């Protein structure tokens, strides 16, 4: 009866009666309430009556209140939601007795070996990432080469015989088919592999567990998908996905096994937990960047800037090691592939080529603001498009169709541009001879052993000349970028470039966010390069002696940097990446200025593209700082309460019930000292995780059993690691009726010293603790150390600074 | 490079004029002292040979100090021979500059020049070999540079690619035959351009294809490239025989159809696909009823 009176008093205490409290399904798991349900099963009837009698406002008296009372309010998807499907990573180590025991057992040598194996893992990450990059590069090159060869021959044939519209259809068809393959594997097999993967990795490194993001299957789909989308002629690049691939490789290698392939190599077992894995994933992301751009330092800084919240000297050094290995591996194997073993001239997937180092012209300053604006426009357009896609185009078949349509339209637009272009330029003979240094990087490399055909189209140009629009469109984007950077002045007419920039801008904006794996780096670079080059040409025209100092190639570089900066809003890492990719430190200063301005101008309007996509996916992402005006909020207002707690020695039935309650998918449970009076929350003595409980249930570590069978093997930390990272769901664990009555002693397994804060702690303080320590659960206690609430990532991430001050995001089921 | 050389010469002149004052003054006062000798030797190492000829005083002094400055007769012969062949090559090459026929016309001369240069550079008789005294004796290394320049020109022209043995290669000859055929066809029809385009198309196409094959096999030299360029220009620009753009309508039709597809797609998915709704979840809060109000109070 204490129960009833408690409920009554509790509900009448609040300003708004019980529905807000007892009625909501989430409250079922509440400490006192949960226990009352399970233990006093017979009493629940009385309990209900009591509640009914006291709380008139309850609309639906049915026992299954879950669905009825909460009355799911449905709203269209928008950016102001937090999804329930994302959980946190356990970065904080659980220092339970098992852990201490293991540490005691480990010798000095053991720790040394661990340190060495960390280095080995990093080396492996680097090598594998480099090899994947190499594989992607070679396959894309050959596939695209083949495609362009077929189309080129076809166009040449029909230019003569008439019927060019057939070539157009052929081109569109080929593009669609290739892209269709890529879209199908992504949409039907692994939707998480869509896009560049940088937002996902950013979230992962932030401490959000994105389901399936670092699985082997994702990697395979990603690699195949990116090959298809680049070869399919979409306005995309293969650099962003490299970062994701690197991260997956890192997550896989560091575990020494593959859960998907059911293969366990029995190595690196110590690394099977979130803390270690996340460190390795940051190394993998760095290796990916470094393989993509040939920028090892840039990769390390990317990991620093975008991800790793946890950073120390040795980790940095290891990450740098992994990136170096990765770019070297790529370089080495590509040089073998190009029959130039040992020349090492391909440090990254994209090669900007060499720039000479006089940065004489200060006129690049005009470019930046404009590019920031363009970047913001790109982001805004893409934002609306993505919302539309999430709301309406969510069925896989529709997504595949959309990707195919984009591919076909890309081909059509390119063809139309080429067809109506009158911009003919003389073919490269004398050009190649005049600029012997640039032969290998000009639009049409004279490299005989490559299967890649020279992608110049003559069409209606005079013999011996080529259509210069075709060099920009009839090419993989990487090559277009390079030709924009390095072709001598006069290779492109201003109208060609203008039309090209405009078209490509919309194509790229349309393409990003499709259900194909593809990056946004190269398209941005391309837009920026085209438009920077246009600017350079204009400058050379309007200023006296302009043609002497205004080298359009340099403006292309600066424009590319500004555009990319305006879209993704990375600062330090992007500067270093670009400097490393151009191989010229002198450009660091203008690139830095340009990126700064682009970021300032762009941030005035809208966030960076990756942040937009993170928001649209409703990820509880924690930024570096708490929202600026949140000091008035205290932990009491932020926390979830009441909390589902367990006793030190808890009945198995209770645990199973709490765990299998689908409406409260809690992951951490404070363990409290037994309290006689249900009214009072217990004193905290530890914290136990759902995953640990599941392992315990699986191994049936019950007090009664331990007593009866003394020879039973003691549970070790290894048993928890073996189940990591895919702990079985509670439904798969069978607990018999007898076993439900058993007791379970959690003392040995719980984390005995969880972090706690008092109720009065301000939000920024909680936030800082959370962010800096990588916590997953933060227990809020009162002055007597009794559990009153629990702060999790979603409680913190929901506050953000909007236009009208502090806003709160809503939780939603996605 | 050019600039640096000029600058250096200028510096040299200044240094010379400064230093040369000193020995002249010394001579006039008849006090040729021994301490000048090391200074002069240093000067010798520093300055190229032109000073010897420009200043007779200096020259005689030099020959006295250096012992026998004269070249061996053998080397002098080689040098003379080199000069003659160099001259004949240049005489041949300059008139062949436009239209470029350098490979075809001058390969014999170049071969001869190369032979004599090889003789010089392979002369290693002891102790006074011509290789060292002709090619490496001074900073300028004139003979070496002259030859190197010509060889660079030869390489850049890819002349070796259309030569075989001591004459033009077979493939080049075949190309020339085809070229002549096309050109004579052009010649015969040059009054009526539309007729020319029709009649000579086969020949021209044959030539063009042959050229592409040569391009792929890298058997092109500048002569062939240039003649082909000229022929193409004739064909496309002068006779106006390139393909006209006459399929605009079908291309526009197909393109607009393609561009129309996504509009239909998006419209239909907007109209027919049910909008994805998100179910909101109410989190449990200690004071869920007033926490948001608090925020709003605090900030309104």
Image (tube, coloured by chain):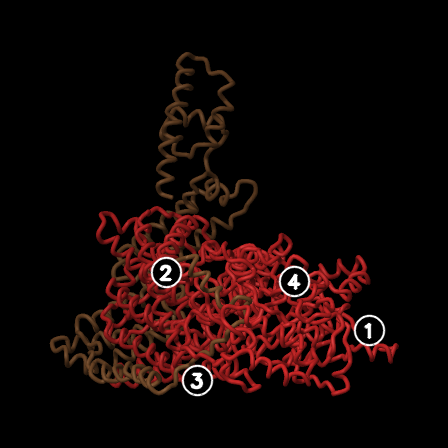
Numbered badge on residue A563: 2
* Circles 1, 4 touching at the beta carbon (< 8 Å): no
Q: Residue at x 60, y 77 (%)?
A: A28
The residue to which callout 1 is attached is A714
Chain A, colour shown: red
Q: Is residue A321 visible?
A: no
The residue to which callout 3 is attached is A395
Query: Which of the marked residues, 3 or 1, is nearer the chain's N terminus?
Result: 3
Q: How dense is the environment of label 4, judged by Cα within 10 Å: few (below 14), some, or many (20 and up)?
A: some
Residue B278 placement: quadrant: bottom left
Numbered badge on residue A92: 4
The residue lying toward the viewer, choosing from B60 and A411, is A411
Chain B, colour shown: brown
Query: Which of the marked residues, 3 or 2, is nearer the chain's N terminus?
Result: 3
* Left or right, residue B21 beside residue A652: left
* Circles 2, 1 touching at the beta carbon (< 8 Å): no
Q: Is residue B40 visible?
A: yes
Count of marks overlaid on the render: 4
* Left or right, residue A241 beside residue A114: left
């Amino acid at each position: 009866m204490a129960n009833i009176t408690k409920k009554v008093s509790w509900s009448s205490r609040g300003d708004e009666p019980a529905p807000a409290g007892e009625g909501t399904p989430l409250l079922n798991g509440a400490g006192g309430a949960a226990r009352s349900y399970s233990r006093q099963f017979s009493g629940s009837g009385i309990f209900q009556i009591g509640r009914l009698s006291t709380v008139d406002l309850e609309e639906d008296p049915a026992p299954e209140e879950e669905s009825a009372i909460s009355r799911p309010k449905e709203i269209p998807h928008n950016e102001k939601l937090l999804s329930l499907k994302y959980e946190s990573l356990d970065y904080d180590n659980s220092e339970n007795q098992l852990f201490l025991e293991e540490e005691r057992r480990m010798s000095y040598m053991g720790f040394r070996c661990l340190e060495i194996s960390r280095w080995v893992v990093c080396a492996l990450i680097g090598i594998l990432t480099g090899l994947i990059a190499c594989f992607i590069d070679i396959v894309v090159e050959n596939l695209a080469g083949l495609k362009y060869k077929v189309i080129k021959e076809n166009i040449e044939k029909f230019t003569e015989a008439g019927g060019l519209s057939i070539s157009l259809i052929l081109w569109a068809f080929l593009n669609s088919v290739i892209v269709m393959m890529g879209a199908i594997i992504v949409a039907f097999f692994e939707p998480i592999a869509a896009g560049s993967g940088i937002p996902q990795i950013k979230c992962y490194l932030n401490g959000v567990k994105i389901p399936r993001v670092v699985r082997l299957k994702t990697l395979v789909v990603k690699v195949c998908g990116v090959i298809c989308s680049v070869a399919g002629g979409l306005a995309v690049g293969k650099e962003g996905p490299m970062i994701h691939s690197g991260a997956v490789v890192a997550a896989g290698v560091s575990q020494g096994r593959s859960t998907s392939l059911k293969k366990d190599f029995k190595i690196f077992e110590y690394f099977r937990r979130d803390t270690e894995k996340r460190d390795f994933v940051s190394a993998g992301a760095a290796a990916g960047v470094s393989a993509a751009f040939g920028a090892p330092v840039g990769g390390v800084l990317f990991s620093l800037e975008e991800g790793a919240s946890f950073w120390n000297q040795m980790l940095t050094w290891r990450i740098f090691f992994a990136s170096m290995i990765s770019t070297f591996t790529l370089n080495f194997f590509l040089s073998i592939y190009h029959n130039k073993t040992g020349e090492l001239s391909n440090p990254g997937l994209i090669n900007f080529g060499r720039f000479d180092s006089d940065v004489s012209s200060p006129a690049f300053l005009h470019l930046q603001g404009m590019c920031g604006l363009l970047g913001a426009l790109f982001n805004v357009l893409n934002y609306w498009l993505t919302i539309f896609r999430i709301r309406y185009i969510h069925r896989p078949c529709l997504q595949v169709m959309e990707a195919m349509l984009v591919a076909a339209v890309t081909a059509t637009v390119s063809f139309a541009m080429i067809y109506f272009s009158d911009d003919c330029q003389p073919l490269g003979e004398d050009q190649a001879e005049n600029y012997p240094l640039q032969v290998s990087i000009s639009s049409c490399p004279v490299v005989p052993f490559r299967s890649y055909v020279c992608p110049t189209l003559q069409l209606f140009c005079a013999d011996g000349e080529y259509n210069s629009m075709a060099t920009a469109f009839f090419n993989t984007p990487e090559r277009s970028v390079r030709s924009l950077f390095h072709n001598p002045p006069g290779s492109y007419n201003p109208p060609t470039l203008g039309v090209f920039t405009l078209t490509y801008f919309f194509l790229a904006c349309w393409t990003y966010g499709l259900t194909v794996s593809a990056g946004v780096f190269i398209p941005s670079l391309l837009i920026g390069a085209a438009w920077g080059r246009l600017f350079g040409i204009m400058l050379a025209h309007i200023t006296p002696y302009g043609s002497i100092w205004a080298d359009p190639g340099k403006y292309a570089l600066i424009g590319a940097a500004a555009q990319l900066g305006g879209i993704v809003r990375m600062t330090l890492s992007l500067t270093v990446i670009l400097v490393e990719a151009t191989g010229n430190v002198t450009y660091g200063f203008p690139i830095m200025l340009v990126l700064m301005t682009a970021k300032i101008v762009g941030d005035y309007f809208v966030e960076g593209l990756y942040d937009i996509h993170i928001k649209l996916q409703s990820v509880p992402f924690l930024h570096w700082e708490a929202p600026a005006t949140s000091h008035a909020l205290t932990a009491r207002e932020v926390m979830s309460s009441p909390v589902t707690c367990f006793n030190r020695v808890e009945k198995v039935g209770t645990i199973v019930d709490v765990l299998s309650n689908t409406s409260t998918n809690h992951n951490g449970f404070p363990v409290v000292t037994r309290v006689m009076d249900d009214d009072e929350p217990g004193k905290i003595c530890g914290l136990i995780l759902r995953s640990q409980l599941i392992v315990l249930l699986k191994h049936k570590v019950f007090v009664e059993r331990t007593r009866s069978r003394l020879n039973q093997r003691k549970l070790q930390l290894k048993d928890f690691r073996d189940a990591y990272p895919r702990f079985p769901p509670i439904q798969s664990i069978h607990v018999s009726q007898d076993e439900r009555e058993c007791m379970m002693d959690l003392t040995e397994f719980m984390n005995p010293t969880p972090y706690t804060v008092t109720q009065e702690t301000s939000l920024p303080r909680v936030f800082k603790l959370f962010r800096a320590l990588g916590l997953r659960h933060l227990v809020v206690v009162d002055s007597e150390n009794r559990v009153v609430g629990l702060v999790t990532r979603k409680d913190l991430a929901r506050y953000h600074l909007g236009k009208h001050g502090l806003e709160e995001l809503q939780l939603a089921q996605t | 490079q050019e600039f640096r050389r000029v600058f250096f010469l200028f510096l040299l002149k200044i240094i010379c004029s400064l230093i040369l004052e000193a020995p002249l003054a010394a001579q006039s006062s008849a006090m040729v002292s021994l301490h000048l000798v090391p200074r002069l030797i240093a000067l010798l190492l520093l300055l190229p040979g032109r000073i010897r000829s420009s200043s007779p005083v200096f020259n005689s002094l030099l020959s006295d100090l250096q012992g026998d400055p004269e070249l061996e007769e053998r080397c002098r012969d080689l040098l003379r021979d080199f000069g003659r062949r160099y001259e004949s090559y240049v005489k041949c090459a300059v008139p062949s500059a436009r239209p470029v026929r350098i490979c075809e016309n001058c390969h014999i001369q170049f071969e001869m020049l190369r032979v004599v240069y090889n003789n010089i550079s392979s002369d290693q008789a002891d102790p006074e070999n011509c290789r060292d005294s002709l090619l490496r004796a001074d900073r300028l290394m004139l003979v070496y540079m002259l030859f190197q320049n010509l060889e660079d020109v030869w390489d850049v022209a890819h002349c070796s690619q259309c030569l075989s043995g001591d004459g033009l290669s077979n493939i080049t000859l075949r190309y020339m035959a085809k070229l002549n055929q096309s050109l004579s066809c052009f010649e015969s029809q040059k009054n009526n351009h539309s007729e020319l385009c029709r009649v000579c198309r086969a020949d021209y196409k044959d030539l063009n294809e042959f050229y592409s094959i040569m391009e792929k096999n890298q058997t092109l030299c500048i002569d062939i490239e240039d003649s082909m360029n000229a022929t193409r220009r004739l064909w496309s620009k002068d006779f106006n025989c390139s393909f006209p753009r006459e399929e605009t309508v079908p291309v526009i039709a197909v393109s607009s159809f393609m561009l129309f597809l996504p509009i239909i797609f998006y419209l239909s998915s907007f109209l027919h696909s049910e909008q994805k709704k998100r179910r909101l979840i109410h989190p449990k809060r200690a004071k869920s009823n007033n926490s948001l109000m608090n925020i709003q109070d605090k900030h309104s």
